[in-house]
Image: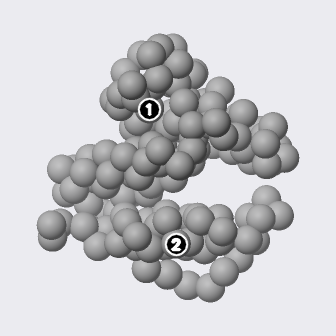
Amino acid sequence: MISYKKAETAEELQGALQVRQLVFTKEQGIEAAADLDIHDAYATHFIALKGKKIIGTARVYLEGGNAHIGRLVVLKDERKQGVGTKLMEMAIDYANKKGAKSAISSCQVRKYQFYKELGYEKAGNEYSQVGIPHQKMKRKLGDK
């Protein structure tokens, strides 16, 4: 059974960062330094757990009235079970409760449809980030 929660301990945060490293660095070949940034220190991190094992994570931080939701990853063997959707829904709900006016995400172009199904729309042109095509996405918040 999969459970979901906000990362509340240093161990949970470290586990979330390790899952990101497995997906971004080992699976996708992105340098670790390109994943970790200053936002990790003050962002709210959500985690998906199978038993005690963290299998997915997403983060959200507030800036200028907007919620920046990203660094969404799910371990390869745990995909296609709704884990990413649930993590995004938790982050969006959190952002709504914090009074954010919109949610902004930078998604890999191949994941565009996933974000569209969550109510996001394109915001700007496609661009390259760490050698991977990305698309800035935006979603209004506050109206359910």
The image quadrant of residue 119 is bottom left
Q: Which is nearer the eye, 2 or 141?
A: 2
Residue type at mark 1 is Ile
Q: Is residue 62 above or below residue 43?
A: below
Q: Nearer the viewer, residue 45 or 99?
A: 45
Residues at discs 1 and 2 in contact (Cβ within 8 Å)? no
Count of marks placed on residues:
2
Residue 133 image offset from top left, x and y in percent:
73, 71
Quick one: SS at disc 2? helix
Q: x%, y% of residue 27?
A: 79, 42
For the point 40% across and 70% down, the residue is: 117
The quadrant of the rendering that contains the C terminus is bottom left
- Residue 14, compared with residue 57, is above or below; it is above
Element type at mark 1: strand
Q: Tell me which amino acid carries mark 2.
A: Gln
Return the disc, 1 or 2, that comes first in the chain's sequence.
1
122 relative to 94 in the view: left or right: right
Quadrant (top left/top right/bottom left/bottom right) for the N terminus: top left
Foreground mark, 1 or 2, reads 2
**Image x and y of residue 70, in percent:** 51, 53
Residue at the spot x=84%, y=47% of the render? 29
Q: Which residue is mark 2?
A: 113
Query: What is the crowding at mark 1: few (fewer than 14 residues within 10 Å), some, or many (at least 20)?
Result: many
Q: Which mark is residue 47?
A: 1
Looking at the image, which residue is at 65% across and 71% down? 109
Q: Is the residue marked by circle 2 packed among few (<14), some (14-19), or many (20+) residues within 10 Å? A: few
Who's the residue at 37% across and 66% down the image?
A: 118
x%, y% of residue 88? Answer: 39, 51
Tell me, what colour scheme is on the image? one colour
Task: Give left or right: position of 87 versus 33.
Answer: left
